[in-house]
Structures are given as structure tokens and as C-alpha cells.
Image: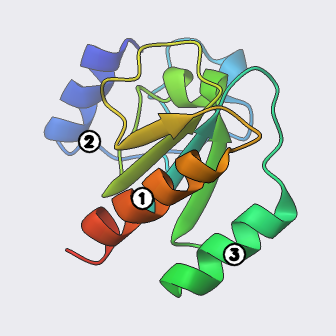
Amino acid sequence: MTPIQSQLWQLLALPAWRCAHPERLPFAPTPSVAAADVLIVLGQGKILPAAFTTDLMHALSLTEAQLQVMDEATWLAANQPSAPVLLGLNLTSSTERFSWHASLPLAAKQKQALWSCLCRLYFAH
């Protein structure tokens, strides 16, 4: 289904169904992406360092379900899902929807800007 058809399917509250391989069914409703409190989108085949993820989870007291990391292609294919805190690293698409974005590895000023953004956005809600 197209994104509009999928939204109409959801609006009409038609029975939902899941498929393990949605790419094999081009007219199926798009699979829903679980909502996260913090969503990090990575571009250009980058991998988020484990220390970065751990630090972020500890600093914000997040569970694994609250922090979601996805690559840019998956994010675009899922109709650009949002989150209260939407962070982008090494993106190739438009960055205007993001709360904060930069490129890996992060410089000291970028780390300060990220922390400032997290304090403002995450602790406000």
C-alpha cells in the first residue's frame, strides 16, 4: 500500500495483520515502527559506538525500548517516524525535522550542543 492507503487502512480501523517479509508484499500495509522516547537515525552505513549508546541510556535513565537506533534508509522507508527527541548522525537527507544532527566522530563542541539539546528536550517532557 502507499502511505496514504496505509493511513486510510489505519483510520478505518480495519483488522491489522503482520507479515515477516513485508518487502514480498508490495501492497501490504506498511509495518508500524514502535514508538521511542529517543530516536537516533544513522546515515551512510555508520554504526553507533556502544559507549555512546550506553552513556546516553545511563544519562537519561532510558530502557532499551525507549532508545531506538535505525539507519536512514529504514527511517525513510517507515515514513520518517518521529520521537520526542529525534537525533541524526551523518545524514544524507533533509535535517530540518531533527532536534539535533551532526557527523561522527563528535567534536567537543558537538557533544556540548548534544547535551544541551537533550537537557532541553528530554527533561522537558
Tell me which numbered mark, 1 or 2, is placed earlier along the sequence: 2
Instruction: Say whether residue 12 is left or right of residue 97.
Output: left
Q: Residue at x 42, y 58 (%)?
A: 35
Label 3 to label 2, Cα distance in Å?
41 Å
Q: According to the image, what is the colour scheme of the structure? A: rainbow
Image quadrant where one finds the N terminus? top left
Tell me where residue 3 appears, x and y as whole percent: 34, 18
Amino acid marked by disc 3? Asp
Give SS at disc 2.
loop
Q: What number is the disc on residue 55?
A: 3
Question: Residue 91 sits in which quadrant?
Answer: top right
In the image, is residue 35 above or below residue 7? below
Q: Quadrant of residue 102?
A: top right
- Contact (CB < 8 A) between labels 1 and 2? no
Q: Secondary structure at mark 3?
A: helix
Residue under pointer 2: 14
Callout in the foreground (3, 2): 3
Q: Badge 2: few (under 14), some or many (20 or more) residues near its Cα, within 10 Å?
A: few
Which residue is pictured at 40% across the width and 46% down the height?
16
- Horizontally, residue 108 falls left or right of residue 50, namely left
Q: Mark yes or no: residue 31 visible.
A: no
122 over 72 or under it: above or below:
below
Gap between marks 1 and 3, in whole Å? 21 Å
Counting from the top left corner in percent of width and height, residue 60 is at 50, 81
User: Which residue bears the numbered disc 1?
Assistant: 35
The three-letter amino acid code for the residue at tag 1 is Ala
- How would you rate the neighbour count of disc 3 (Cα within 10 Å): few for under 14, some for 14-19, many for 20 or more? few
- Which amino acid lies under the numbered mark 2 shown in the image of this protein? Leu
